[in-house]
Amino acid sequence: MRRKVLVVPATVGSIGQPPETVGAQAPEDGRQFARGPPRLPSEPMGSKRRPAREEHRMRRKAFAAIATAAIVVLMMMPGTALATHNNRIPDFSDPNSTRGPNGNNCSADAITPSPASSYTMTYGDYAYRLRYSANCRSVWGRSLNSAPRRSAMHTHRHSDGALTGSCCITGDTYAWTRQLDDAGHLSNLHLGNPAYDSTALF
């Protein structure tokens, strides 16, 4: 019994020919096909990826533009002020109606410095206190409306001798002097001019 032998036609490819060239037609000028790495579908012909440094720079520019726009919007809002190192309240202004860098009146965050006993003068049942606003960086004097010596209160800035006039601006309960800028200065409250009593410097 004879066995049949299967003969592979030579047209499929020659022995030793690279598999990837099987069936490929050589160009007429004899050049070989250049087979580079496969191009990703997301990268069309001729496209180049943007360098990472350029993308980072573009993101920074976009963020700066958004931040600038936000600042402009805040400045346009009524009753809003932006704090800077150059914000200074005017001397002899009313702390109860003058707004500081955060948009609130200077009196809104006012305190008597600590220890309170060093910044308070007491006569009988009445106290005369030095008041300080961190928002406005200003000082003034305050007492009760009924305090008998309230008109003698003066706020004094020692660096240049600035002195508020005789008290007082009055409210429903308290009376107070006008305020002085205290940023980088030492000031105090005293009674009388010349003074016959005064608080410690602040």
Image: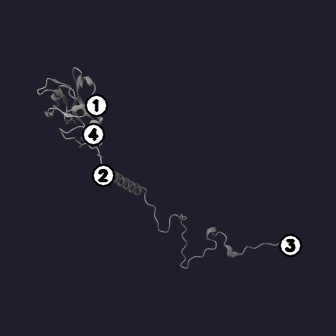
**What is the spatial separation of the Cα atoms under label 1 and label 2, in whole angstroms?**
30 Å
Sequence-earlier tag: 2 or 4? 2
Q: Amino acid at mark 2?
A: Met
Instruction: Return the x and y of residue 77 as percentages of the image width and height.
Output: 31, 50
What's the CA distance linking mark 3 and mark 2? 102 Å
Q: Which residue lies under the disc numbered 1?
A: 111
* Residue placed furthest toward the bottom: 28
State the SS at label 3: loop
In front: 142, or 163? 142
Q: Residues within 10 Å of mark 3 (few under 14, many from 20)?
A: few
Q: Position of residue 82 (x, y in %)?
A: 29, 45
What label sits on residue 2 in the rendered view?
Answer: 3
Residues at discs 4 and 3 in contact (Cβ within 8 Å)? no
Relative horizontal placement of residue 143, taking residue 30 as reference (left or right): left
| Extreme residue in the right direction | 1
Q: CA distance from mark 4 to mark 1?
A: 13 Å
Q: Nearer the viewer, residue 132 or 47?
A: 132
Question: What amino acid type should be assigned to the residue bearing mark 3?
Answer: Arg
Q: Earlier in the sequence, mark 4 or mark 1?
A: 4
Badge 2 marks a residue whose secondary structure is: helix
